Image (cartoon, helix red, strand yellow):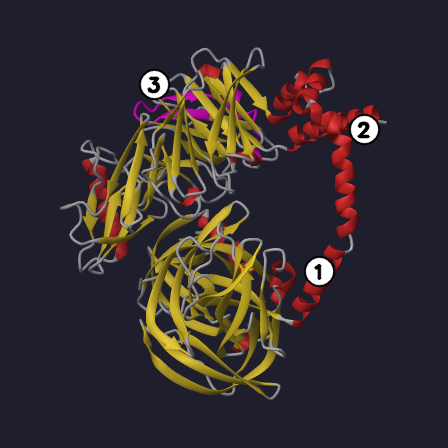
């Protein structure tokens, strides 16, 4: 019987190993001219693990630990024949690993760069370089550049670099694309001015700077900065490449200085539905379809030398990639200047390389790589793998029966208790409502539980428009301490005035909301001005109950007594769900997403113990990441910081339109008319007409009331020349 159980355990381990191999998501990268391949996949201990294999023998050469946080994000490029892999570890430290063909690893960052948030919002690949932006522990914005396997970091508070202390840095939208000569960042200064800095460092390893003049709009300043940076760095703004936004999406020359598109790039064969991949300072890969309808043709590609205007046909390697993958942000091409090897990595799918001089190439997909691993002795039943299993335990194999007996005895005595405890906790959760709160006080009770202190915590929270406090006792671990000011989630029982802390496992069932329809606006209190808008306290009545909601009224929009609205209650807080003609808005057309907070601007406006904050967030939706600004009245004392992940409710139709239009052209436009029809949440729904180069475009979207839109405003928009649709990317008032 013992032998039977040991064999079953051994067999199940082999089967689990095979399943794990098949389910593992890994990225593949070729090295040493294609003779070696690096596999990168998740690892329980270090976050990510790299393994270097010989392609010919399929043998493991070396293991490379890659420190990463739970998100497992990875940014990659090639420099000086080495693979550069960038990760972010649990302590928010940036790790840049330069891996040579023998598996040797050089760390380019020695714990000198700390980032908060997601890796792909701070590290920007650009023509073979890696450009990093962020803030130091002292909140000083910085730029770092990895070029030719070397890291250069510049804090932007250096003397004489900028005229005032920098306070915040953000990427200039579109400046890392193929139709921009120089990547740029926008920097907020302490004296309320804006400056632009180049992401490309000059020979003195400092960025170029340009400070917005008093008589300049932000759009004009951005154009002047781009022109100045390009001239100083020897980059021409003429002859850049841009994919036409209209069907059939061919590549055209583009002059960034005049913002005019030129003729179609004369590739040897026409390329339709094209994609551009800038590779280095002078080469760009153009890939697409042989026919206007990509479903009827096949994939082809050309390597374009922007200086010599010569084309090299690389369709042999590009055609191995499905057309749909060409549009994926997980597909990356690499080629160093002067190298004859073009490489690509399609995360979790395949990798490939091609020597453009002799035409040799190779492709390795994940299925083939899994077959490599499955064929190894340690991953299949064999004498070697069985011996390895026995070596893991030795005496443990003999003592296994004893431990099973102990486990059975322990389980038998405790089998009934856990279900009872779970049922009791569920009853308490059903009686309470989920509310966010803040720890305001801590005191010791003098009691120890398993040598851990039992602490009495006071939690402040908002419930039904009132500020309340409740005391909760909790055993606090020395390894995971809590502090005054920490944000927590509680389940509050209004009948007993008691609360309990919630765990992450409790939240999915408790994250409910209540819609209150047919609320009538009875009274409006004016509470001060906010930029061009007005802070108001709206008093509604629904079902005989009063509700007070703070909002910002945009310039040109007006709340009126007697109008109806729909309200929403979440976690004890009541907010505006829809107002006016939109009061019957169906919640099914909204998406519940998550956003990373990248900037917070507080205003000196507090209503009903709720302060007005303006959040700038990055909204994640599938592979898309969109920048949004949204103002909210947040309970005072609730800790919200840059890097926090917060929920976001977005109207699906508006989100789909924004994603579609952001793939087209962008530019400035002057507002010629504005009208409103109700609200989406507390954001007024606007119909806006803008004029650009003598053509009219039409915007239908909700607008941020703190900024608002007025006739005569100069907006930065994304637009479609055929449908005349547009969306706002940046407001006139920032």
Between disc 3 and disc 1, whose residue precedes? 3
Quadrant position of the C terminus in the picture: bottom left
Residue 557, image x, y percentages: 41, 76
Report which quarter residue 385 is drawn in.
top right
Q: Residues within 10 Å of mark 3 (few under 14, many from 20)?
A: few
The reply to whether residue 296 is in sight is yes
Q: Residues within 10 Å of mark 1 (few under 14, many from 20)?
A: few
Alpha-carbon span between mark 1 and mark 2? 34 Å
Q: Which residue is mark 1?
A: 421
Q: Are marks 1 and 2 in contact (CB under 8 Å)?
A: no
Report which quarter residue 98 is drawn in.
top left
SS assignment at label 3: loop
Q: Which residue is mark 3?
A: 338
Q: Which residue is mark 2?
A: 5
Residue 598, image x, y percentages: 39, 54
Q: Residues within 10 Å of mark 2 (few under 14, many from 20)?
A: few
Q: In this rendering, is residue 562 above or below 117? A: below
Q: Nearer the viewer, mark 3 or mark 1?
A: 1
Quadrant position of the N terminus in the picture: top right
Q: In this rendering, is residue 514 above or below 156? A: below
Alpha-carbon span between mark 2 and mark 3? 61 Å
Question: Which residue is outermost to the right?
Answer: 1
Tell whether 93 sits left or right of 472. left
The reply to whether residue 722 is in sight is no
Which residue shows up at 43% across the image and 75% down it? Answer: 551
SS assignment at label 1: helix
Start and end of the magenta stretch?
302-323
Which residue shows up at 63% across the image and 21% down it? Answer: 373
The stretch drawn in magenta includes residue 259: no
SS assignment at label 2: helix
Of the pair 38 and 706, the residue shown nearer to us = 38
């Amino acid at each position: 019987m013992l032998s039977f159980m040991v064999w079953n355990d051994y067999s199940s381990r082999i089967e689990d190993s095979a399943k794990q191999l098949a389910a593992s998501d890994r990225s593949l990268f070729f090295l040493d001219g294609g003779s070696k391949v690096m596999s990168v996949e998740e690892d329980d201990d270090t976050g990510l693990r790299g393994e270097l294999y010989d392609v010919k023998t399929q043998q493991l050469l070396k293991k490379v630990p890659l420190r990463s946080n739970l998100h497992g994000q990875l940014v990659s490029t090639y420099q000086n024949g080495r693979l550069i892999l960038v990760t972010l570890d649990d302590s928010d430290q940036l790790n840049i690993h330069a891996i040579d063909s023998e598996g040797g690893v050089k760390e380019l960052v020695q714990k000198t760069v700390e980032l908060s948030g997601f890796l792909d919002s701070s590290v920007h690949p650009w023509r073979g370089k890696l450009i990093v932006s962020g803030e130091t522990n002292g909140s000083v914005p910085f730029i770092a550049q990895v070029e030719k396997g070397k890291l250069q970091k510049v804090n932007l508070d250096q003397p004489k670099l900028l005229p005032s202390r920098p306070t915040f840095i953000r990427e200039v939208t579109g400046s890392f694309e193929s139709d921009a000569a120089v990547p740029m960042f926008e920097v907020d200064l302490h004296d309320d001015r804006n400056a632009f800095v180049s992401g490309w460092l000059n020979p003195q390893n400092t960025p170029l700077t340009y400070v917005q003049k008093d008589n300049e709009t932000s759009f004009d300043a951005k154009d002047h900065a781009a022109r100045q940076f390009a001239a100083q760095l020897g980059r021409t703004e003429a002859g850049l490449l841009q994919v036409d936004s209209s069907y059939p999406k061919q590549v055209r020359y583009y002059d960034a200085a005049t913002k005019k598109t030129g003729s179609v790039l004369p590739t040897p064969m026409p390329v339709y539905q094209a994609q551009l991949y800038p590779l280095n300072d002078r080469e760009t890969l153009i890939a697409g379809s042989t026919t206007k309808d990509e479903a009827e043709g096949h994939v082809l590609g050309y390597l374009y030398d922007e200086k010599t205007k010569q084309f090299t046909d690389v369709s042999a390697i590009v055609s191995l990639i499905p057309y749909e993958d060409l549009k994926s942000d997980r597909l990356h091409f690499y080629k160093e200047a002067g190298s004859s090897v073009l490489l690509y990595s399609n995360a979790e799918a395949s990798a490939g390389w091609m020597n453009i001089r002799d035409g040799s190439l190779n492709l390795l997909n994940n299925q083939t790589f899994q077959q490599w691993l499955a064929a190894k002795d340690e991953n299949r039943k064999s004498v070697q793998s069985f011996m390895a299993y026995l070596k893991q335990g030795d005496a443990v194999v003999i003592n296994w029966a004893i431990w099973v007996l102990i486990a059975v005895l322990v389980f038998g005595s405790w089998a009934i208790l856990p279900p009872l405890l779970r049922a009791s906790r569920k009853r308490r959760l059903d009686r309470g409502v989920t509310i966010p709160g803040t720890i305001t006080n801590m005191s010791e009770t003098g009691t120890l539980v398993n040598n851990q202190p039992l602490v009495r915590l006071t939690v402040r929270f908002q419930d039904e428009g009132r500020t309340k406090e409740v005391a909760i006792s909790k055993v606090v671990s020395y390894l995971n301490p809590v502090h005054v000011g920490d944000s927590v989630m509680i389940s509050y029982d209004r009948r007993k005035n008691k609360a309990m802390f919630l765990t992450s496992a409790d939240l999915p069932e408790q994250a409910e909301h209540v819609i209150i329809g047919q609320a009538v606006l009875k009274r409006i209190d004016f509470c001060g001005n906010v930029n061009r808008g007005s802070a108001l306290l709206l008093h509604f009545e629904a079902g005989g109950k009063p509700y007070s909601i703070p909002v910002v009224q945009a310039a040109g929009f007006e709340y009126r007594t007697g109008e109806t609205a729909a309200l929403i209650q979440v976690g004890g807080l009541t907010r505006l769900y829809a107002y006016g003609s939109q009061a019957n808005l169906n919640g099914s057309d909204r998406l519940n997403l998550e956003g990373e907070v990248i900037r917070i601007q507080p205003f000196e406006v507090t209503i009903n113990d709720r302060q007005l904050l303006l959040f700038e967030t990055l909204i994640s939706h599938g592979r898309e990441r969109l920048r949004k600004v949204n103002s909210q009245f947040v309970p005072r004392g609730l800790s919200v910081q840059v890097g926090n992940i917060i929920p976001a409710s977005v109207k699906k139709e508006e989100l789909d339109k924004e994603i579609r239009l952001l793939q087209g052209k962008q530019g400035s436009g002057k507002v010629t008319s504005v009208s409103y029809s109700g609200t989406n949440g507390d954001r007024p729904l606007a119909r806006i007409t803008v004029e650009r180069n003598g053509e009219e475009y039409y915007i239908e979207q909700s607008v941020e009331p703190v900024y608002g839109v007025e006739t005569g405003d100069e907006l930065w928009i994304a637009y479609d020349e055929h449908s005349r649709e547009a969306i706002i990317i940046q407001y006139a008032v920032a």
